[in-house]
Amino acid sequence: MSLRIFGGPHRYFQGPGAIDELGRIARPFGARPVVIADAFVLDMLKDRLNAIFSNEGMEPVIRAFSGEITYAAIDALDASLGGEQPSLAIGIGGGKSLDAAKGLARKRGLDVVTVPTIASNDSPTSGSIAMYDDHHVMISVDRLARSPEAVIVDTALIAAAPLHFLRAGVGDAISKKFEAEGCLNGSGVTPYGTRPLLSAIAIADACYATLRRSAQTAFADLERGALTDAVEDTIEATILMSGLGFENGGLSLAHSLTRGLVKARDAKNAIHGQHVAWGALVQLAAEGRRAELRSLLAFNRSIGLATSLEDLGMNEPTDVEIEEIARWTTTAPHLGNLPAPIDAAGIAEAIRAVQRLSRA
Ligand SMILES: [Zn+2]
């Protein structure tokens, strides 16, 4: 008998205009939160944020953030506050601003509210912070003591962002069903260090089913500027279901492959969600799930997600390059989260199988 842990954000808000809830949500923590946001987001939302906070009698400390999430950057952000004692950390913008807010919250023991303005991955709901060194190499995934207090997903903002971000978010989410299953069927553990919960498997299943049902329609709707139920469903699956799925269900081979891809020629420049979308195919190949592999490959292709290394920007990968990706993949901590153990040779073979199927 082992401990089961389920974690998630305290509250999740989603819909057009949801950002207008921010003042009401932040106010109970105090009148002086720190807001960390991308400079262009601050520019774009300036008047709106002023209204949101002044309506509640709040005076936030505002910091623009750019660059990489390093310990030095978090220390500098912390130092820039001087003697301020902020009541809450609020991150607004893309992943880096949200992680900067989380990093500061972790350092100061603050609660955090995330307000993603793009949906390129599921980090807004999670307690994870991806830490990098000065060479843009991820060195660790730190954890907040508490999940975000609130996640505010203003779908009008998400819909106005370039579509390739949401497409990447769908890629990051599409793997979660297979990763959580791999974790459960193997001996894997979640980011809490405990075994996956059945609740997480159910959520990851719903995430996958929702995306298969709605994502294609959602992208067509967004092309014509329509914010429909299919768009809302796709965003919910991409941010909330995907985040709860991995934090409580665990990661597996699909995410392990990103360890190799971030070092691979040209493919390293592709966005995380595209890496993971391709990684999900390799995981299915490695597990011998042929029918699901074919089905997912066709789906990926239909919405512009990667089905080959070429799609990730790596033209004519050599055998040596494929073996390199496989070798780095074996350094990922969640590699063991598969029903049967796999080594670098097995991973390379699965990559080649997906390469062949994608060309067929
Ligand atoms: Zn991811």
Image (tube, rainbow, N blue to C red):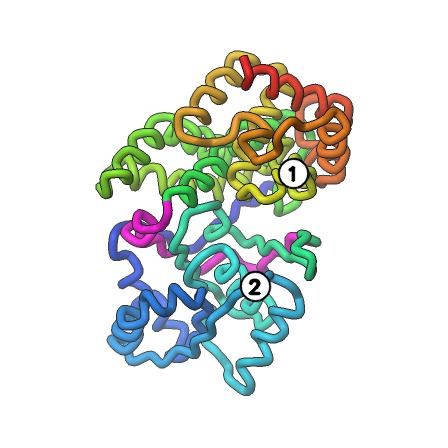
Dot 1 crowding, Cα within 10 Å, few <14, some 14–19, many 20+: many
Q: Measured from the top left, where is residue 117 in percent x and y?
A: 38, 55
Kindly state the secondary structure of the residue where label 1 is placed: helix
Residue 327 falls left or right of residue 355: right
- The dot on residue 353 is none
Q: Measured from the top left, where is residue 109 in percent x and y?
A: 57, 70
Instruction: State the residue at coordinates (51%, 30%).
Output: 306
The residue lying toward the viewer, choosing from 21 and 306, is 306
Q: Measured from the top left, where is residue 206 in percent x and y?
A: 41, 31
Q: Quadrant of residue 154?
A: bottom left
Q: Amino acid at mark 2?
A: Gly
Residue 142 counted in the magenta span: yes
Dot 2 crowding, Cα within 10 Å, few <14, some 14–19, many 20+: few
The residue lying toward the viewer, choosing from 21 and 284, is 284
Q: Measured from the top left, where is residue 360 in percent x and y?
A: 54, 12
The magenta region covers 140-162
Rendered position, 62 above or below 228 = below
Provide the residue designation for mark 1.
261
Provide the residue designation for mark 2.
67
Kindly state the secondary structure of the residue where label 2 is placed: loop
Residue 176 counted in the magenta span: no
